[in-house]
Image (cartoon, rainbow, N blue to C red):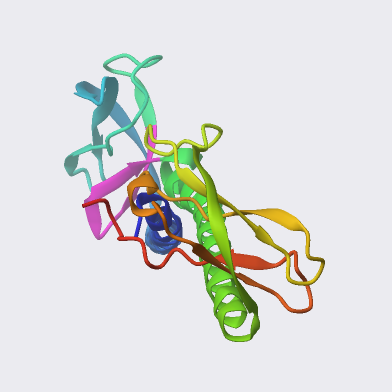
Amino acid sequence: MNVLGLFKYFFAIFGLAAIVTAIVLYLDTASFMKEAVSGQGTLENVRERRVDEKTICEWVLRFHTEDGRPIEFSTRAGTRCSGVRIGDAVPILYSPARPAEARVDDFFALWGGSIIGGLIGPVFLLIGGIWIAAGRRKRRRVAVLKREGRRIETELEQVEQVTSVKVQYRHPYRVVTRGRDPLSGDSRRFLSDYLWYDPSPYLQDVSVPVFIGCDDPGRYHMDLSFLPRSPK
C-alpha cells in the first residue's frame, strides 16, 4: 500500500482516538465535578518548558482544604504563561476525598480537552471513513469491469508526471494509452490511476489492457497489474 493509501486509515484511526479521548476526558471531568468544592489557591511558581520550539507552562499552586490541610499541586502542561504573577489568587476546585488532584476553576482548563477532541475527532473520522468507503467502492467497480466489461488492447502514448498533485514532496505518474473504442470505433485516450514510481521501463513493446463498461464506455479501468509493486 502506498503512502497516500495509508493516510485514509490514519485519518480514521486518529479521529476515532480523538473521540475516545474526548469521551474519557469528559467522563473524568464530570465525575470530578460531582464531588468538587470551590476553593482559593495561591500561585507559588510557574515552571516553563520548551517543547517543539514552544514554551509551555505548569502552575504550582497551594491552597488549604476546609479542615485546614495545606495542599500543593501542579496544573497540566499547557497553562498560559503570561498575565500571571507569583502570589496571585487563583480559583480552584478540589475533591475533599482527593485534594491533591485539585484543578484550576477555569472552563477551558476543565473542558477544553474534551471539546477539542469532540470537535476534531468526528471530522477526521468522517474524512477517513469516506476515503475508505470510496476506495472499496472503486475496487468493486474495477472487479465488475474486469468480470463484465469488454477488454481491449491499447498502445502506450506516454507516461506523464502529474505535477498538480504532490504527496510528501513527490509527484505521481500516470500512464496514457490510446486504443479504439469498441462501440464507436473511434480512437481515444485512456488514463491510468496514479503510480508512485516511473513505470516507463516496464512498458516497452507491450500492449496495455483496458476494460470498458459495456453499457457506458465512459467507465473503464486500465489494468496495470502486470507492473511490479515497486521498481526493481
Classify the position of the N terminus by image quarter. Answer: bottom left
Q: Residue 99 magenta-drawn?
A: yes
- The residue at the point 82 percent across, 66 percent down is 184
The percent position of residue 4, horizontal first and vertical second, equals 42, 51
Residue situated furthest bottom in the rendering: 147
| In this rendering, position of residue 30 left or right of residue 75 | right
**Foreground: 225 or 96?**
225
* Above or below, comparing residue 23 to residue 203 in the picture: below
In the image, is residue 2 above or below residue 158? Answer: below
Q: Residue at x 27, y 26 (%)?
A: 57
Number of marks in the rendered image: 0
Whether residue 168 sits left or right of residue 65 in the image: it is right
Instruction: Between residue 157 and residue 171, name the one nearer to us.
Output: 157
The residue depicted at 73 percent of the width and 71 percent of the height is 182
From the viewer's side, name the closer residue of 222 and 182.
182
Q: Position of residue 119 (x, y in %)?
A: 55, 50
Location of residue 107 in the rendering, given as x and y in whole percent from the top left corner: 50, 41
Residue 207 magenta-highlighted = no
The secondary structure that dominates the magenta segment is strand
**Quarter of the view holding residue 73:** top left
Stretch in magenta: 91-104
Residue 204 visible to an observer of this rendering: yes
